[in-house]
Amino acid sequence: MTSRRTRDRLIARLRDMGIDDERVLQTIKKVPRHLFIEEALASRAYEDTALPIGYGQTISQPYVVALMTQALFAERPLAKILEVGSGSGYQTAILATLAAQVYSVERIGALLQTARRRLVTLGYRNVSCKLSDGNQGWPEHAPYDGILVTAAPAEIPETLVTQLAVGGRMVIPVGDVDIQELWLIRNTGTGTSRSRLEDVKFVPLVTGRE
Ligand code: SAH
């Protein structure tokens, strides 16, 4: 169920759905998604679906992970990334494969602990995690070349926009609980440019820590 063939099938599906960045596809093929979910669900790890990770949260659907990662890295390599919503740590691992340093914040302590343990066990040395409200970003390490938000606010938090480096990019789902739009925000140096990618469904970005 977690075999090479199963992973190849997932990659073929992502290609069919329009993902064409080879670095992203190879990273998704390599990162062991089955180790980021409970054992009871591991047989479904390479299906293209979101799965529960406890506390009412989900590990994102592989297609959405691929879409967001592809949009984030589309222009140039990014050295320093902020992720908001560590969850299972799966997307964190994908980012850590593609960037030099990843900072990830999560508001649910138990999820953060598990994610951190997994990332250490799997040998990701370039990840720092923190328990905090991601609406505030992680100002100490700003500015970031890339910011990826994996929970949806009703509106784009301005604090996050201010933590983008010049030329930096943010990928963020925005909207109400039922449906959101995925947005790409760029810091142009003189302001920001914003473009809409597609409709997605995420858990809400909650305000405050648990
Ligand atoms: N990228 C994760 C997706 C997890 S779901 C993965 O691949 O598994 C989104 C996560 O965002 C949840 O774990 C949720 O607790 C977290 N979250 C929601 N609001 C938050 C906030 N204000 N600050 C930090 N994390 C938040």
Image (spheres, rainbow, N blue to C red):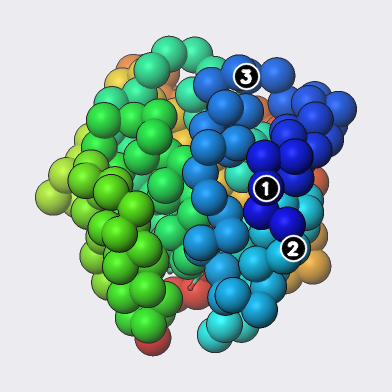
Q: Residue at x 68, y 73 (%)?
A: 41
In the shown orientation, is residue 79 left or right of residue 70?
Answer: left
Does the closest atom of ligand 1 sit within 8 Å of the Cβ of label 2? no
Residue 78 in which image quadrant:
top left
Whether residue 163 appears in this view of the structure is no
C-alpha separation, residue under disc 3 versus residue under disc 2 = 24 Å
Q: Residue furthest top?
A: 76
Q: Residue at x 31, y 21 (%)?
A: 166
Label 3: few (<14), some or many (≥20) within 10 Å?
some
Residue in the foreground of this view, choosing between 4 and 142: 4
Q: Earlier in the sequence, mark 3 or mark 2?
A: 3
Q: Amino acid at mark 3?
A: Asp
Tell me the element at label 1.
Answer: loop
Residue corresponding to mark 2:
44
x then y, percent, for residue 161:
39, 41
Q: Earlier in the sequence, mark 2 or mark 1?
A: 1
Residue corresponding to mark 3:
21
x then y, percent, for residue 169:
44, 29
Residue corresponding to mark 1:
3
Tell me the mark number nearer the camera, choosing from 2 and 1.
Answer: 1
C-alpha separation, residue under disc 2 versus residue under disc 1 = 12 Å
Tell me the mark number nearer the camera, choosing from 1 and 3.
Answer: 1
Tell me the element at label 3.
Answer: loop
Label 1: few (<14), some or many (≥20) within 10 Å?
few
Q: Amino acid at mark 1?
A: Ser
In the shown orientation, is residue 171 left or right of residue 143?
Answer: right
x then y, percent, for residue 177:
72, 70
Q: Earlier in the sequence, mark 1 or mark 3?
A: 1
For residue 16, which numbered disc appears in the image? none
Tell me the element at label 2.
Answer: helix
